[in-house]
Structure formats: C-alpha cells, structure tokens
Image (cartoon, helix red, strand yellow):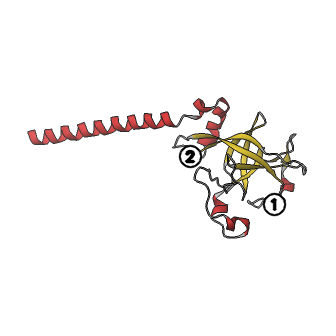
Amino acid sequence: MKKLLKTIGLIVWMSFCFCVGYTLASVADNAQHPSAVELLPEVKRANNLFLTKKPSVAPRIKKETVLFTVFKDENLGVGIDKATLEVNDEGMYLYQGKVVIATATHECVSSNVGACAMINGIPVDYHIFHYYDEAFIQVNDKTYLAIVLDSCGSCSVDCAEAYQRVDILVTDDTSNMLVEGKIIYAY
C-alpha cells in the first residue's frame, strides 16, 4: 500500500512539475511574440478578423517593413477580372472592401508554369502568403485592410533591396510607386 501511495504521489508531483514548466514556457514564448493589442493599437480590430480563421488558437501578429510597388494586371491569380472590382479614392482596387495586393505566395512557389516556374527559392526572411490571406498595410501614413489575390514574381525573389516587396493593384498607369511601409499579418 505504501508503494502504491508513493507511486501515486510521484505521478502527481511529475504532473504538477510538467504543468508549471509548460505554463512558464508559454509565458516566455508570449513575451517573445507580443499579442496584437501590445503590438499596435489599430490591430485591436484585427484580433477579431484573425481569430475567426482559427478560433481555438490565439494568433501571433507580425509587423514587417516592406517596399510597396504597384501592378496593373487585368486578371488576378485567383481568377478574378479586375473589371469586377471597386476602386477607392486613392485609385486602389478593392475586393469586398479590402485593398488588392500581390506578393510572394505558396501558389506561385509550388507552380511550374509561367513566371512562377522561374522562382527556385524565396529568401528565408520573406513571408509567403496564400491566396485570400488578409493583412493590414500601412502606406503613406494610412492603414488599409488588404487581401492577397495575386502572386508577384519580383516580390518572391531577393532583388538586392532592403525589404520584401508587396504590390498594390492600382488604376493609375503612370504610377511608379516604390515606398516603404508596413504589413501586419497573423501567422
């Protein structure tokens, strides 16, 4: 009987130690990866957006500096014709109220046709999105909710620039924007 009680006590003690260790590891992990609320005030509303995708897992939010450029494709990688999209006051195309962007995508990386076939590796510090991923973009001191609807070949390779590129679908044919900004996304 004493041996049984010792064994049960040992199991309870080990379980307690495991739970304390796990809790401490979680706290340390969260200190390295701040929550959306700590990262940026305007991302508070993003919490609801990001949580709806994986309600059982609290998202980690990342904010990165990127180079914003523009593109003017007629048909997007997801199969949508830009003629069906709305346009905001800044000349950016919108899909369901979100600014349309193109960047490095898993769809392009896994493709072996067209321009994407020439991409044979994305720099390790680049984030790779999926079609229909959403993010906040901060460009020219304004914040927009954006959606990835196309792939960008030059956004997927190291162009000897300081940051990864993100293209914004625009109407202005003369626009040659190349401006630093921020992208905020859940991962």
Question: From the viewer's perspective, is residue 113 above or below residue 5?
Answer: below
Q: Residue at x 34, y 34 (%)?
A: 20
Within the image, what quadrant is residue 130 found in?
bottom right
Residue 78 location (% of width, % of height): 73, 59
Residue 68 lies left or right of residue 6; in this view the side is right
Q: Residue at x 46, y 38 (%)?
A: 29
Assign the N terminus to one quadrant of the image.
top left
Question: From the viewer's perspective, is residue 23 above or below residue 130?
Answer: above
CA gap between label 2 and label 1 equals 30 Å
Q: Which residue is mark 2?
A: 54
Q: Secondary structure at mark 2?
A: loop
Residue 67 location (% of width, % of height): 73, 45
Within the image, what quadrant is residue 112 found in?
bottom right
Say if residue 1 shows up in the picture: no
Q: Which residue is mark 1?
A: 75
Amino acid bearing label 2: Lys
Residue 11 lies left or right of residue 22; in this view the side is left
Residue 12 location (% of width, % of height): 24, 38
Image depth: mark 2 or mark 1 in front: 1
Q: Secondary structure at mark 1?
A: loop
The foreground one among 84 and 139 is 139
Within the image, what quadrant is residue 19 found in?
top left
Say if residue 121 shows up in the picture: yes
Q: Residue at x 61, y 42 (%)?
A: 50
Q: Residue at x 77, y 45 (%)?
A: 99
Crowding at dot 2, Cα within 10 Å, few <14 / some 14-19 / many 20+, comes out as few
Residue 57 lies left or right of residue 162; in this view the side is left
Amino acid bearing label 1: Asn
Mark 2 / mark 1, whichever is N-terminal: 2
